[in-house]
Structure formats: structure tokens, C-alpha cells
Image: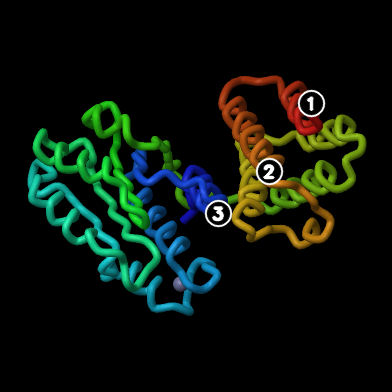
Amino acid sequence: MIKNESIQVLEKKFNENRLAHVFLIETNDKQSALKDVLEFCKLVNCPENYLSPCTKCNLCHLIENDSLPSLKIIYPDGQAIKKSQMEELKSDFASIPYLSKYNIYIIQDAEKFNASSANTMLKFIEEPEKNIIGFLITNNKENVINTIKSRCEIIKANYSEKVECFIDEKVQNLAEEYLYKLEVEKEELIVYNKDILDEKLEKEEYIQLFQTLLDFYLSLLNGKRKFVKLKDNLQLNQETILQRVYLVNEVIERLNYNVNMNLLLDYFVLSLED
Ligand SMILES: [Zn+2]
């Protein structure tokens, strides 16, 4: 599965020690979001240098099987998340974790707090303990009780319907070539745009091209760089990489409308240089 980029931003924050202690994840796919959060749990807890999939440690194995004591996944009990569930969580997490670095709870269907469970939850959030990280997952943050929502850092994680996106070889090669021009040679980019236009790609292929670029920049963020050709030639700091991620995202969004490709590609390469 392709990880959602929002979750990768979370990883980045964690690596920079900028982690909030409760997150509200609004998503169109709660199962995928849960899977990604579990990946994140492995990343922060793994005693090895975590690389997915981790085959080295027992901790990742326990997380995978939902049998780590310091990880609680809570689902609504019937129609609501109940006060007793929150009280149980509170007492479970009263002690510091002994197997892992963090106590982590994940609450599915965060819109299903009722007044009394929300109250207990609030007290829990307001007396933050070190070593506790919480994730609330919902389809629609507007349905989550305001007092809880306002104390969370909100993350949007949308997953495309196509889980596996097939990118054909021509587009893949073109994307690698483009990256090389953009990031290594850095010359005559406007002219090179003309070469790309000469390929007469379909709109869908342009989207794939930029998704490949996005994938590449994200792979730099989590330290797993793709494309051997670029490996030794590339010096980008984290801030630049993030700017690239936002820019490429913007281009992909614009591609969904009728755009003049010539102008869009030129806008892209000119923005890169800013
Ligand atoms: Zn591990």
C-alpha cells in the first residue's frame, strides 16, 4: 500500500521532535489510516532503525498483531465510545510503558464520543503525560465534539481509490530524466519542458509523471531515496524537499482541471528555482 503523505509529514515531525500529543485524523478510509498509524507506531517504538517491514524486532511484531500492552486500539462499544472504555484506557496508561518508548492509543470513529466519555477523554488529554500519543480517527471532523477537536492537531489523510497505481515504463523513465534535469543539471529547464511536451502525453500520463516526482521527494523525506542515478548527486535540505512536495501536489491538483500544459510545466520549473 502506498502510504498517505500526511502520515509521512507526521513521521517528519516526529523526527524533528515536533510531535503534538493528540492527533485527529480526518480520512476517507479509516482502515488505511489505521494501518498507517500502526506503521507510525512501529517507527517511533522500534529499537532498530525502522524500515518497513521490520523483521528484526519483536516489538514491531507485537504491534502488527495488536498484542503490545502499550498500544490500545479502541472501537465504539455499540453505538458509542463509552465512559468505561475511557476510564480503562486512563488506568492502563497510568504507568509508564515498559516494553516500548510510548503508550499509544488509537480511537476509531472519534465522532462517537458521548457527553460522559468525552468528559473523561478531556481530562485525560488535559493532564498530558509524557510518553503518551493519541490518534483519533474519523470520517468527518465536523461531527467530533468541539471540546475534543479543539485540543487536537488535525491531519487530513485522503486515500485514492486506486491503491496500486500502475505507472508505465515510458512515464517512469521520463520522470527520472526530468528529475535529473531539475535537480542535478539545472539547466535549460524551459527547453526541456518542450521535449516533454513533444512526447504528447495523455493527461493521465502527466498525472503519473508528477506522482512519480512526488513519490521521489517523499522518499527523500523518509530517507529511503529512490532512483540510484540521482543518489550521489543530490543535496536538498528538508525545507526544500517539503517545498517540492507542496509544489508537486499543487501541480497534480491543477492537472485535474483543463490546463495549458505548456504554462503549467513552465510555472513548475520556475517555482522550483524560487
Ligand atoms: Zn522493529
Kindly report which numbered mark, 2 or 3, lies closer to the viewer in this rendering.
Answer: 3
What amino acid type should be assigned to the residue bearing mark 3? Asn
Q: Residue at x 28, y 39 (%)?
A: 138
Check disc 2 and report the residue beneath it.
Answer: 241
**Who's the residue at 37% across and 74% down the image?**
61
For residue 27, which quarter of the picture?
top left
Q: Is label 1's Cβ within 8 Å of ligand 1? A: no
Cβ atoms at labels 2 and 3 below 8 Å apart: no
Report the front residue among 234 and 30: 234
Identify the residue at image location x=81%, y=32%. Answer: 273
Q: Estimate the spatial distance between the alpha carbons at disc 2 and disc 1, rounded to whole Å.
A: 19 Å
Amino acid at the residue labelled 2: Ile
Amino acid on which the number 1 mark rests in the picture: Asp
The residue pinned by badge 1 equals 266
Q: Which residue is mark 3?
A: 15
Give the x, y percent position of residue 62: 33, 72
